[in-house]
Every structure is written in structure tokens, then in C-alpha cells.
Amino acid sequence: MAEKIKTVRGFRDLLGEEAKKYRFVVNTVRKILERYNFEEIILPTVEYTKLFTRSIGEATDIVEKEMFTFTDKGGRDVALRPEGTAGVVRAYIENKLYADGTYKKLYYEGSMFRHERPQKGRYREFHQIGAEILGTSNPLADAEVIKISEEILKTLKIPARIEINSLGCKKCRPAYREALLEYLSSHKEELCEDCQRRLERNPLRILDCKVEGCKLIASQAPKITDYLCEECKTHYESVKKYLNALGIKYTENPHLVRGLDYYSKTVFECVSEELGKTVIAGGRYDYLVEELGGPPTPALGFAAGIERLALLVKELPKEKPLVLVIPFGGENEKIHALKLAQTLRKNGIRVELSYREGKIRKQFEFANKIGAHFTVVVGENELKEGKYPLKNLLTREERKLTLEEIVETLKNL
RNA sequence: GCGGUGGUAGCUCAGCUGGUAGAGCAGGGGACUGUGGAUCCCCGGGUCGCGGGUUCGAGUCCCGUCCACCGCCCCA
């Protein structure tokens, strides 16, 4: 045998149940988003590397070590997208979607790439479905984005807690940062190695550290919510008021910070206890559009990890019952079965025509193996009589029916 | 990127201190020539992840490497 070629590390096939669950998640989320009047945007997979370094932040792990970057044959410095928001914002600016003076609601879906250590629920190619609202600072939008996330989880029957926080804005964050830095510096010696490094680069992340000692220090740290400016405080209060009005259960987590630099004001995460991982996350990014060369435009959005959600889907919607049409005999019977199968399919029935040869017993074993619910045998007797035995494999009950009667019986199951 | 565990048949795994592979399930056929999941009988199938080393001899020991899983970092 020739050398077997395998998938590249961190890349994989989705098939069978996994593929079905994946599709179920995507279809469910799409339906919800379209009910909220989001429009789909189909984005390129490859963008200039600069788009991501500028949006996500130079000092983030994603940019520092996780991007799939390469130079194309024209010498362009490009990358496989590690997330979707940057692309949407780029498209928003490039296509001048701000021109009509309203806000835009867009959703996308597709592969994202991050060169990380693979694990269950974490691959180098993974899929997200996300939505963005560009051009509004109204806290109603923040509440609705969180509402959508909750609705996704509820519809998929996935338990997850919703955590929210506010990261403030350009006005209030610097003061907080300073206070935090001052507090953390006074405890520098007690922090873990990573956090000592973070102190310089991204002190906010220390709040999120999992090391016990750091957690303790973090728990005493000044809270961003105590430092919010009037505007941010009002905004945050409004968001919470709307969430309460919608009956959404959430917990405030003053230590919730996100890994991407572009967030401001509202941030949130939906965390699955079972997975121990975040399944949906998002927030507001009021400066990103401007930083990427567009007009000042407040915006927000979220992204859902499709595989992570799929991993938590326990039950799939019922499929149409499968009918196995079994030709039994020679060429005449095969041709008859071939046409009979078409008639059933034309009526919306899911039909497999058996290509299997041999004894009738083997045909029924085959029917079981492929999970058929019904069988129809097309043999010599049937051609003579014009009636076919429709058998329900679960109840083992069999009735001789005409083709029309079979169609009538199966059509609406 | 760091640490840990593991890779033997399609699947789950056994294989003691080195002596050139085995079970269960699955698969194919038959008992049973137009009716299935049971039972019995028979059968096929493996470069023991890959490469190197030690050895008369390596699935077994050593080194490297790849892959998977778990934890960390980080994240959807």
C-alpha cells in the first residue's frame, strides 16, 4: 500500500453524529439571528496580517504565537483569520456600510485558525458563528446581544452561566489601570511567574489568573466597576436593567477580562460547567472601527464556538424515517425497484435503494445495519400483483400495499 | 510553547523479568433458497504509530520523532 496521508495536526474531519450536531448548531443559530434581522456576510478566510495585529492587539497570544501567517506569491504578508470580528469591521469600512447613517447588523460563519496545542474542544481549525452590530452605542444592543446568546443556549438545551462585566472606556480605564497597577506592584513578589510578566504587558489579565495565590491577590484588587466614568456606569446600569427586564440570569464578574485588546464597556462570556470552557463570548468595541481606518463607530458583537456547542448537544432533532427498497430477483425487478424508489423520493420520502445482492435475509440484515425504519421488497410476486410488502422494522408488522398506498402511509411521517 | 499519560486487528484492550502476536466485539460466509437484531460452525484480517540504537533476537529496553488525550498558558 502507498503511504497513507493523514490530517495535519489540529485539523480533522467531522462526520456522522459530529457532522449532524455541527449542522444542527449552525442552523439553530442562523435561525435565531435571522429572527433578530441580522444579515449574513460571507468573509474571506485570508486577510492581511496587519488587520489582525492592529485589531486583536500586538501583545496578545493570538497575535504573538497563534496565527497562521505566510507570504503569498506576490510577497503579501497574509494570515488565516484567527477570529471573525476584524474581518467584519474591515468589510464594513471597505464597503462603506456606514454611508446610509443607520446601524448594521451582520452575521458570519466559518473556519477560524489558531496555532495552539490541540485538545478536546480546541483545534487549530475550528468554527465560529458570530454576529456584529456596527454603528450604535445604545445599551439596548448590548442587552439584545446577550439575549441572543442566552437564546442560543436555551434552544440547544446547553446549560451555561452568563458572566458580564464592564471594562470602561478611554476616559475611565487609564485611572483604573493605574490603581490596579499600583495595587499589584505592591504584591509583586507574591504573584506567579506569568503574572509578574503580565504586570508589564497586560495587568488586566492578572485578574483572570488561575493560580491560587494570584486569585487571592486578585480578589482584593480594586474593581473596574468602582472606577467607571458616569457614561460607562450609566451604560452598564442600563444593560443590567434591560437584562433583568428580559428575565436573563447572569452573574457580574468584575474579574472578567477578554483576551482581545479591542473591547470596551460591556463584555460577557457564557461558560459551560461541563466543558470547563467558554462557549460564547463577546462584547463592545467602540474604538475598533476607527482604529482600522473607519469613521468613529461604536460597535459590539459575539462569537459562538460551533464545535464546543456541538460537543454539548445531547439530542438531535428527529430525522425522517428511512425506507430501504429491496430489489429481489433479476433485471426486471431491479428496474422496477429503481423507479419505485424515485416515486417515493419525489414525495419527499427518504429512500435508500439497496445495491446489496444476495439472499433476502441479507437484505434485511442490511436494512438493520443502515438504520432503516421501513423496507419495501420488489420481487417477482410484487410485479405480478402490483402490491408491495411495506414492513415496519420496529414493530415487525408488514402490510401488502399498492405504491399509492405506500406513498400515503409514509409521506407525512 | 511547557508538563503528564498513552499509541498492538475496523473498535475496546491483553501481551509477566526481551524468545518474532492474542481475546472479545465488529466484518464476510454457512446452518436457514422471499423476511432482520438470537444461537451454533467456519473464515479473513496486523509493516505492534514512525525512525534509529542495544541485543544472537525488540510489541517488550534506550533515544528521537509524529499523533491523540489530560493539565498549564491562552482561548470559541
Image (cartoon, coloured by chain):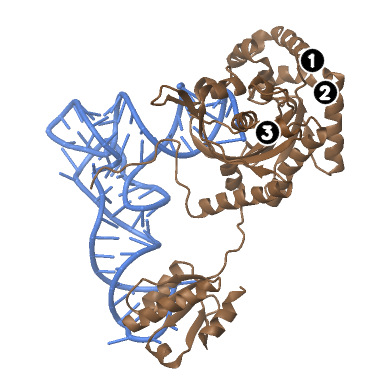
Chain colours: A brown, B blue
> Mark 3, chain letter?
A
| Left-right relation of A322 to A143 | left
Image position of A171 (left or right of A261): right
- In the image, residue A392 lies at what x, y percent? 53, 78
Amino acid type, mark 3 = Leu
Q: Position of residue A254 (x, y in %)?
A: 76, 25
Label 3 and label 2: CA atoms lie apart by 27 Å
The local secondary structure at tag 2 comes to helix
The residue labelled by disc 2 is A232
Q: Secondary structure at mark 1?
A: loop
Residue occupying image coordinates x 85% and y 38%: A242
Q: Are marks 3 and 1 on the same chain?
A: yes
Location of residue A114 with respect to A217 vertically, above or below: below
Same chain? Circles 3 and 2: yes
The quarter holding residue B64 reads top left
Return the residue nearer the eye: B18 or A187.
Answer: A187
